[in-house]
Amino acid sequence: MRLAAGGRAIAIMYHDVVASGALSSSGFSGAGADIYKLDREEFVDHLAKMPFPPSVVDDAGTVTGSSAPEDPVFLTFDDGGVSAYTEIAPILEERGWRGLFFVTTDRIGTTGFLDPAQIRELASGGHVIGSHSCSHPKRISACSAAELRHEWGDSVDALEQLLGAAVTTASVPGGFYSQAVGRSAAEAGIRTLFTSEPTTRIGQADGCLLVGRYGVWRGMPTSTTGRIAAGAVLPRWRQSAWWSLKKAAKSLPGDPYAKLRRVLLDRRG
C-alpha cells in the first residue's frame, strides 16, 4: 500500500532509550529532553504490548513490513541520539522490526549522537533515515524562509551525501509545525513529514504528506502505545485534547505555554 492524503496511519513518537539512570548518555540534555527518554526495560515493555509489527515507508511513499490489518503503524525516533544504534535498533531487530530514525544533522558525530558509520549501518539494516533539521531550532515555525531552506535543504543534502541515496522523510523538531515549515520541507524534497500532532488523518502540504504522531514519555503506562496502535479511542482522544490546549496556549501573546512547561519541569526536578 501507499500513503495518501486523506488516508490514515498511526505513528508513535519515541526519542532515546537508555540504560537505567543514564539519561545523559544519548541525545539532547536537560529536563525538557529527559522526559522523553525511556529506560531500556521500559521500552522493551512498550514493544511487548504492541498488537502488530510496525511498518516503514520508502522514498516513494510505499508502506512495507507487516502492520495492522487496516492502518499502518510506524515507530519513529527523533533527534538522532546514539541510542538509536546502541539500544533501539538491536531491540527492534530482535523482533524482526524496523524503525524510522530522524537525525539532527549538525549533531552527527558529536557526544551522545550518531556518527556517520552508525547512520550508514542503520540504513543498510533496513531502517529508514530521515531529517530532523540541521540544528533542531527551538521553534522552527518562527524561522525565516531562508532559515527553513537551510534547516531542511542542508540537512537532507548532508544525509544524502552520507548515505548515497535519496532522503525523503523527515520529522518536525519540537512539534512547531506551520504551513511555511511544510512548504519548505516539500521544496527540499521531503515527501513524508511526520509532525507531533496526535492524529491518524494524513494531510498534505505542497505535495508533502503530513503524518501525525502520538507521543511517548518517561513513566507513561507501557500499555498506552499498544492501545493506540490497536485503535483505542480514549488514549488517542486524551493526547488530541491536550494537544489542542497546548496549540491554543502557544498562540497567545507572551508564550504562556513555554512558561507553564518550565514550571512543570522544575517541579519534576
Image (tube, helix red, strand yellow):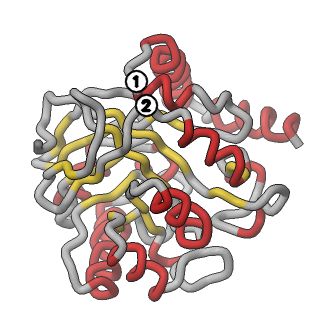
Other residues around mark 1 within 10 Å, as few (<14) / some (14–19) / many (≥20): some
Res. 83 visible in picture: yes
* The N terminus, quarter of image: top left
Q: Amino acid at mark 2?
A: Pro
Q: Is residue 65 above or below residue 159?
A: above
State if disc 1 and disc 2 touch (CB < 8 Å): yes
Q: Is residue 263 above or below residue 55?
A: above
Q: Secondary structure at mark 1?
A: loop
Q: Secondary structure at mark 2?
A: loop
Q: Determine the residue positioned at 50% across, 69% down.
A: 135
Res. 130 visible in picture: no
- Measured as percent of width and height from the top left, residue 156 is found at 29, 73
* The C terminus, quarter of image: top right
- Marks 2 and 1 sit apart, C-alpha to C-alpha, by 6 Å
Q: Is residue 105 left or right of residue 20?
A: left
Q: Amino acid at mark 1?
A: Ala
Q: Nearer the viewer, residue 113 or 91?
A: 91
- Measured as percent of width and height from the top left, residue 203 is found at 21, 34
Q: Determine the residue positioned at 71% across, 35% down.
A: 261
Disc sitting over residue 230 in the figure: 1
Q: Determine the residue positioned at 68% across, 31% down.
A: 220
Q: Determine the residue positioned at 66% across, 64% down.
A: 28
Q: Nearer the viewer, residue 48 or 10?
A: 48
Quadrant for residue 91, please give it. Answer: bottom right
Give the mark nearest the N terminus, 2 or 1: 2
Label total for image: 2
Q: Is residue 34 above or below residue 135?
A: above
In the picture of the structure, the residue carrying the numbered disc 2 is 51
Front disc: 2 or 1:
2
- Measured as percent of width and height from the top left, residue 144 is found at 36, 59
Q: Is residue 97 above or below residue 47?
A: below
